[in-house]
Image: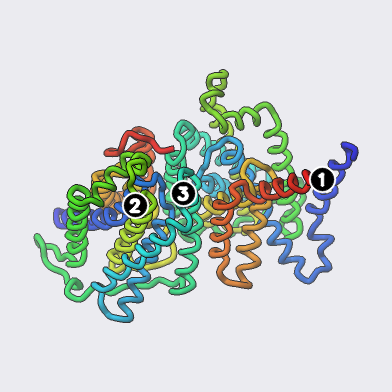
C-alpha cells in the first residue's frame, strides 16, 4: 500500500461525513439521523478535549463540563446581549471564556494528584455550575438560557438543520486534525511523558506544572467550542450543561472508547449518544445499559473499545 | 437578623449538620478503609429514601423503614463489593470510576421503579408537631434529627473504640495491607465496611426524606454534600466527618439566608480553598492516597 492510500481513505471518509445530510436525504429517517449524528459530533469534540487531559496528560478531571457550560453560555449570552449572529464573535467568545476559566481552574489543580485531583476538579466545576444555576439575571438560572440563535459566517446562514450539521462536522474535523498534530508533536510527547512519570520529566528539565496547565487551557478552549456548538444546535443552554452529569457523561465516553487515543473518544461519544438517543426510546432504561457497559469496560477492558480492537488485530496478525 | 430568626437558623444549621454527618460518615469510613471515594454514595442515599417510602406505604411505620432501608442498602453493599470492587483491588482510581457506573444503574432503576416525579414522606407520628423554644415555633422532627445525629456519632465512636470490629477498622484505616498480612480476613472486612457505608447512606436517606422529599437530582445533591463534608473535615476519620458536618451544616444554612443567590458557589469555594491549603482536610490523615 502506498502512503497516499490511507490519506485518500481519510479524505473520502471526511467528505462523506460532512455531506451526510445530502446523500442520506432519500432515507426516511435522514433528519433524525442527521440530528443524532450532529449531537454525537458535538460530544465527540467535547470527549476529545477531555481525553487530552485524561488520556494524554494523565489528569482525570471530573469537572470538564465547567468549560463546556462556560462556552455554551458565553456563545448564547454574547449573541443575545450584542445582538449578533456572527460566528467569529460568539464562537470566539466561547473559546476565550472557557480558556480563561481553564487557566484559573487549571492553575489551582495542576499540582494535585489522584483522588484529590478528581475531587478538586469536581468542586471547582460545581462553583461554575452553582453560578450558572443561581445567577438568574445573566444565565436564566434554573430555567436555562433559551432562544440562542444559530450563527452566520460571511453571509452564510447556519440556521437550517443541514447547514448546522455541516458547521458541526467541519468544526469536528478541524478539532480532530488539530489534536492529531498536537499529540504527535514534541509537546504532545512531553504530555505523555508527564502522564507516565512526572518526576522524571521534571528531572529532565521540563516545567511539568506549566505543561499540564497549557494542556488544561487547550482542552478547556476546545470544550468551550463544543459547548457553543451545543448551544447553537439546541438553541438552548441548560445549567446542567455545566453540571456533574455532563462531566461524567464525557468521562464515560472517553473510557468506553479508549483513553489516550483520538479514535476512542469519538467512538465513545457515538456509543453513548446512540444508547441515550436511539436505544432509550426502544428500551427505556438507557442509563442502566450505559452504566452496565461502563462497568464492564472498567472491569474487563480498561483500554476501551480501541484497546480491545487493537488486541484483536494483533492476535489476528500473529496467527 | 432578629435574635429569634438567628436562633431558628442556628437550629436549622445544626439539624442539617446532623443529617450531613449521617450521610458523610459512610463515605468517610469507606474511604478510610479502602481508599475509594464511593461516587455511588448519593445514589445509595436516594435509594434509602425510596425504600423507606415503600415501607411506609405498605406498613405505615416510619420506624420500620428506619431499620429496613439501611438493612436493604447494607445487603446491596455486601453484594456489590465482592462482585465488582474486589476485582480491582489496589487500583483505586478504577474503583472510583466503577462506582460511577453503579450510580448510573441505581439512579436509573429508581426512576423505573418509583417514577421520576417529586415524592414526599410524611413526618413520623409523634414528631410531626412544632414546639415553642425561646419564643419561636420549631418543628420537633428537626430536633429529632439533631438528637439522632448526636446519638449515632456517640454510638459509632463507642464501636470504634470499644469493640473488636472497631479495632479492626481503626487498624485497617492505618494500614489495611499490614492487617491482611497479620491474618485478618481483609476481603470480609472490606465487604463489611462497604456494606456499613451503604447502610449509613440509606439511613441518611430515610432521615432526610420527611424534610427534603425525594426527587431526581437527590443523588447528586447527596453525593456533593457528603463530599464537601469529608473534604472540609478530613477524609477517613470519624472526627473529620463530625467536624465537617458541624461546620458545613450551619455555613450552608446561613449562607442561603445571607447570600441567597451565591450560597452554593460560596460553599464550593470554601471546599476548593480547604483542598488547596490543606488537601487532607482540617482533621485529615497525613497520608495522601494515590
Depth check: B53 or A151 in front? B53
Residue A253 in the image: state x and y as whole percent: 60, 52
Q: Is residue A6 left or right of residue B225?
A: right
Mark 1 surroundings: few (<14), some (14-19) or many (≥20) residues within 10 A: few
Q: Give residue A10's mark.
A: 1
Residue B57 in the image: state x and y as whole percent: 33, 79
Q: Please, which chain is the residue tagged with disc 1 on?
A: A
Depth check: A125 or B19 in front? B19
Q: Quadrant of residue A93?
A: top right
Query: Of discs 1 and 3, which sits in the foreground?
Result: 3
Name the residue at the front extreme.
B183
Disc 2: which residue: B189
Disc on the earlier residue, 2 or 3: 3
Q: Quadrant of residue B231?
A: top left
State whether residue A95 is above or below residue B23. Answer: above
Q: Secondary structure at mark 2?
A: helix
Q: Is residue A62 visible?
A: yes
Mark 2 surroundings: few (<14), some (14-19) or many (≥20) residues within 10 A: some
State whether residue A229 is above or below residue B213. Answer: above
Same chain assignment for discs 2 and 3: yes
Name the residue at the left extreme.
B134
Q: Is residue B232 visible?
A: no
Quick check: marks 2 and 1 in contact, CB under 8 Å?
no
Depth check: B188 or A111 in front? B188
Q: Give residue B96's mark.
A: 3
Residue A246 in the image: state x and y as whole percent: 53, 53
Q: Please, which chain is the residue tagged with disc 2 on?
A: B
Q: Residue at x 33, y 45 (%)?
A: B183
Q: Is residue B154 left or right of residue A2?
A: left
Amino acid at each position: 500500500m502506498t502512503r497516499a492510500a490511507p490519506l485518500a481513505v481519510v479524505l473520502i471518509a471526511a467528505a462523506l461525513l460532512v455531506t451526510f445530510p445530502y446523500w442520506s436525504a432519500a432515507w426516511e429517517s435522514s433528519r433524525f439521523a442527521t440530528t443524532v449524528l450532529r449531537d454525537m459530533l458535538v460530544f465527540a469534540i467535547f470527549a476529545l478535549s477531555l481525553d487530552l487531559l485524561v488520556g494524554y496528560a494523565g489528569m482525570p478531571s471530573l469537572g470538564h463540563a465547567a468549560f463546556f457550560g462556560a462556552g455554551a453560555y458565553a456563545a448564547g449570552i454574547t449573541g443575545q446581549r450584542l445582538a449578533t449572529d456572527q460566528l467569529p464573535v460568539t464562537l470566539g467568545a466561547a473559546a476565550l471564556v472557557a480558556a480563561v476559566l481553564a487557566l484559573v481552574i487549571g492553575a489551582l489543580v495542576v499540582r494535585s494528584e489522584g483522588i484529590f485531583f478528581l475531587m478538586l476538579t469536581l468542586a471547582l466545576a460545581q462553583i461554575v455550575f452553582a453560578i450558572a444555576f443561581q445567577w438568574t439575571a445573566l444565565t436564566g438560572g434554573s430555567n436555562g438560557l433559551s432562544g440562542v440563535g444559530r450563527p452566520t459566517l460571511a453571509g452564510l446562514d447556519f440556521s437550517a438543520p443541514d447547514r448546522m450539521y455541516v458547521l458541526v462536522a467541519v468544526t469536528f474535523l478541524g478539532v480532530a486534525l488539530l489534536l492529531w498534530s498536537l499529540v504527535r508533536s514534541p509537546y504532545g510527547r512531553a504530555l505523555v511523558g508527564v502522564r507516565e512519570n512526572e518526576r522524571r520529566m521534571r528531572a529532565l528539565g521540563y516545567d511539568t506544572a506549566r505543561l499540564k496547565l497549557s494542556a488544561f487551557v487547550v482542552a478547556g478552549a476546545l470544550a468551550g467550542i463544543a459547548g457553543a456548538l451545543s448551544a447553537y444546535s439546541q438553541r438552548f443552554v441548560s445549567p446542567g450543561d455545566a453540571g456533574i452529569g455532563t462531566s461524567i457523561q464525557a468521562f464515560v465516553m472517553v473510557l468506553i472508547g479508549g483513553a489516550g487515543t483520538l479514535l476512542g473518544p469519538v467512538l465513545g461519544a457515538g456509543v453513548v449518544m446512540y444508547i441515550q438517543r436511539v436505544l432509550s426510546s426502544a428500551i427505556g432504561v438507557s442509563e442502566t445499559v450505559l452504566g452496565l457497559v461502563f462497568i464492564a469496560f472498567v472491569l474487563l477492558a480498561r483500554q476501551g473499545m480501541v484497546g480491545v480492537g487493537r488486541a484483536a488485530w494483533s492476535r489476528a496478525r500473529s496467527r | 437578623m432578629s435574635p429569634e430568626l438567628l436562633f431558628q437558623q442556628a437550629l436549622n444549621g445544626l439539624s442539617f449538620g446532623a443529617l450531613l454527618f449521617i450521610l458523610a460518615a459512610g463515605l468517610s469510613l469507606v474511604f478510610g478503609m479502602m481508599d475509594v471515594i464511593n461516587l455511588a454514595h448519593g445514589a445509595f442515599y436516594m435509594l434509602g429514601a425510596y425504600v423507606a417510602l415503600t415501607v411506609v406505604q405498605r406498613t405505615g411505620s416510619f420506624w420500620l423503614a428506619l431499620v429496613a432501608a439501611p438493612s436493604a442498602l447494607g445487603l446491596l453493599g455486601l453484594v456489590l463489593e465482592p462482585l465488582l470492587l474486589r476485582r480491582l483491588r489496589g487500583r483505586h482510581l478504577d474503583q472510583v470510576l466503577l462506582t460511577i457506573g453503579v450510580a448510573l444503574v441505581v439512579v436509573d432503576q429508581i426512576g423505573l421503579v418509583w417514577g421520576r416525579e417529586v415524592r414526599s414522606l410524611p413526618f413520623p407520628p409523634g414528631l410531626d408537631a412544632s414546639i415553642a423554644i425561646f419564643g419561636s415555633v420549631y418543628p420537633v422532627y428537626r430536633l429529632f434529627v439533631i438528637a439522632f445525629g448526636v446519638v449515632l456519632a456517640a454510638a459509632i465512636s463507642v464501636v470504634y473504640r470499644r469493640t473488636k470490629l472497631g479495632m479492626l477498622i481503626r487498624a485497617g484505616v492505618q494500614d489495611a495491607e499490614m492487617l491482611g498480612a497479620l491474618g485478618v480476613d481483609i476481603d470480609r472486612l472490606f465487604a463489611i465496611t462497604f456494606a456499613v457505608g451503604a447502610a449509613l447512606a440509606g439511613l441518611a436517606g430515610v432521615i432526610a426524606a420527611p424534610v427534603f422529599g425525594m426527587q431526581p437530582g437527590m443523588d447528586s445533591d447527596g453525593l456533593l454534600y457528603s463530599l464537601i463534608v469529608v473534604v472540609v473535615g478530613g477524609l477517613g476519620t470519624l472526627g473529620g466527618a463530625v467536624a465537617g458536618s458541624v461546620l458545613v451544616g450551619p455555613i450552608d444554612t446561613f449562607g442561603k439566608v445571607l447570600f441567597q443567590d451565591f450560597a452554593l458557589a460560596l460553599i464550593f469555594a470554601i471546599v476548593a480553598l480547604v483542598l488547596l491549603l490543606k488537601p487532607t482536610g482540617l482533621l485529615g490523615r497525613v497520608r495522601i492516597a494515590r
